Image (cartoon, rainbow, N blue to C red):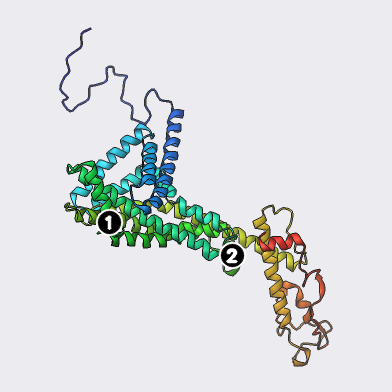
């Protein structure tokens, strides 16, 4: 078989072989790959992003016992194995982005760095967000498991703060170990020598102890705020309590608040990780600018965490709104004389507890108001022009409670009797055992 000789590329593609043939734009799906298969690959990439984030988050915890220990090496290999499973398109995309970021950092322009890192998020926003969510999994799960009421609130928060601090410490130690080892290997050092220098650089008593301590402090703050704090409140009773104490924020406002609480701390942590790596390399004698890549990595971490913070903020806002609605329904039921038994339409135990809480609050307010009735001997100037006149002005009982009937008198006479059992069937009604259980959240 003969082959036509190769022709040098002149910077112009060959013309279509026929007038009816035209070039088709690339849709990131190969000619022999169906759209359904492409969707499966895309879903697989998302799952890998989340899974690799989880292993990275756990690896940070194990790195506190010394980066590159047996557990950390296992988790690192697990992360690499997951990353190798991504689709060829995603691999090529990440490789191209890595080269763009490298060129931007070498340019010395902070603006170019930020654009390069932000471009990485724009290419795969869901992947990046899921990876960040996975990294935060340890502290989020801790809030979910300890925020349900079985653990005191201060202990639940302490658990998240402690895990956050551990992740912060481990993250810095791991970053230093990896960057120092790789840099020495690139410089021609042996595996053993590079590992030794990296272990010394990430040691608690080593030259980078200050960076490690700062990473722990930032991690502790992040572990007790933002999405982690929202999960703890959602898992516990705090949402219902806040709904009773103050007006529930709107969902949009809660979403914005969630972003504002989460993104800045993640930006600080991301930037500090890169700064710690740079200063560690400087300590090893390498010529690395102190702030190279710091702004870019901070921007990327902030963008990656913003959807997570906003998402949990929105969930908290909807929970606030629902709790306020249930409590309002419970209060209205008390005012209408209904017993402290949630309607059958409410199925959730949490929703029942919120309804009962509203009923209880209304009852307590009514009792407090009734206890503040002014004795008849101290009244003066009561309207008595006609029978049944009501002196509303000097009565302290809110009308919606239904207890304002005690303000009714005949021709200047005002009854000073206290409320008694029978009104609503329950001014002092303690409710059924099941209602008591709902009120207690059990």
Image vertical order of residue 197 relative to residue 432, above or below: above
Q: Circle 2 is placed at which residue position?
A: 243
Residue 114 appears in view: no
Position of 66 compared to 372: left or right? left
Q: Secondary structure at mark 2?
A: helix
Q: Name the quarter where the C terminus is drawn.
A: bottom right
Q: How far across and how far down the image is residue 363, in percent?
A: 72, 71
Residue 79 sits in quarter: top left
Q: Are marks 1 and 2 in contact (CB under 8 Å)?
A: no
> Could you classify mark 1 by the number of other residues whose Cα lies within 10 Å: few (under 14), some (14-19), or many (20 or more)?
many
Q: Secondary structure at mark 1?
A: helix
> Could you classify mark 2 by the number of other residues whose Cα lies within 10 Å: few (under 14), some (14-19), or many (20 or more)?
many
Q: How far across and how far down the image is residue 333, in percent?
A: 73, 64
Q: How far across and how far down the image is residue 95, in percent?
A: 29, 38
Q: Name the quarter where the N terminus is drawn.
A: top left
Residue 35 sits in quarter: top left
Residue drawn 17% across the image and 15% down it? 5
Residue 12 appears in view: yes
* Sequence order check, earlier mark of 1 and 2: 2
Q: Circle 1 is placed at which residue position?
A: 276
Image vertical order of residue 432 relative to residue 187, above or below: below
Instruction: From the viewer's side, name the closer residue of 137 and 32.
Output: 137
Position of 382 compared to 17: left or right? right
Give the Cα separation between the discs numbered 1 and 2: 42 Å
């Amino acid at each position: 078989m003969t082959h036509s000789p190769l022709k040098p590329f002149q910077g112009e593609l060959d013309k279509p072989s026929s007038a009816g043939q035209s070039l088709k734009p690339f849709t990131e799906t190969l000619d022999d790959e169906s759209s359904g298969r492409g969707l499966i690959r895309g879903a697989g990439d998302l799952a890998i992003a989340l899974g690799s984030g989880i292993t990275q988050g756990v690896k940070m915890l194990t790195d506190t016992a010394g980066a590159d220990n047996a557990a950390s090496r296992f988790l690192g290999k697990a992360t690499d194995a997951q990353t190798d499973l991504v689709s060829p398109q995603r691999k090529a995309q990440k490789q191209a982005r890595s080269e763009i970021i490298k060129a931007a950092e070498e340019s010395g322009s902070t603006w170019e760095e930020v654009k390069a890192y932000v471009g990485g998020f724009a290419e795969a926003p869901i992947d990046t967000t899921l990876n960040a969510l996975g990294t935060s999994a340890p502290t989020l799960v801790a809030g979910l498991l300890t925020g349900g009421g079985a653990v005191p609130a201060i202990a639940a928060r302490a658990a998240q703060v402690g895990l956050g601090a551990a992740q912060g410490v481990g993250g810095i130690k791991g970053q230093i170990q990896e960057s120092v080892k790789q840099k020495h290997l690139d410089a021609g050092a042996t595996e053993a020598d590079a590992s030794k220098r990296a272990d010394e650089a990430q040691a608690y008593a080593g030259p980078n102890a200050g960076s490690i301590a700062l990473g722990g402090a930032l991690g502790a703050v992040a572990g007790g705020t933002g999405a982690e704090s929202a999960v703890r409140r959602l898992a516990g009773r705090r949402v219902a309590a806040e709904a009773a104490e103050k007006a529930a924020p709107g969902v949009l406002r809660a979403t914005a608040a969630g972003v504002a609480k989460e993104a800045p701390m993640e930006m600080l942590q991301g930037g500090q990780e890169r700064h710690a790596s740079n200063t560690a390399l400087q300590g090893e004698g390498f010529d690395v600018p102190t702030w190279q890549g710091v702004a870019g990595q901070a921007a990327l971490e902030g963008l990656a965490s913003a959807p997570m913070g906003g998402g949990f903020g929105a969930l908290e806002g909807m929970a606030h709104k629902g709790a306020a609605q249930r409590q309002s329904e419970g209060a209205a039921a008390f005012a209408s004389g209904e017993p402290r038994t949630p309607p059958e339409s409410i199925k959730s135990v949490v929703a029942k507890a919120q309804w009962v809480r509203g009923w209880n609050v209304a009852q307590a307010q009514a009792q407090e108001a009734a206890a503040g009735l002014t004795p008849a001997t101290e009244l003066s100037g009561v309207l008595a022009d006609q029978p049944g006149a009501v002196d509303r002005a000097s009565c302290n009982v809110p009308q919606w409670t239904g207890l304002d009937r005690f303000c009714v008198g005949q021709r200047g006479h005002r009854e000073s009797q206290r409320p008694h059992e029978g009104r609503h069937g329950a001014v002092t009604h303690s409710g059924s055992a099941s209602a008591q259980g709902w009120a207690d959240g059990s």
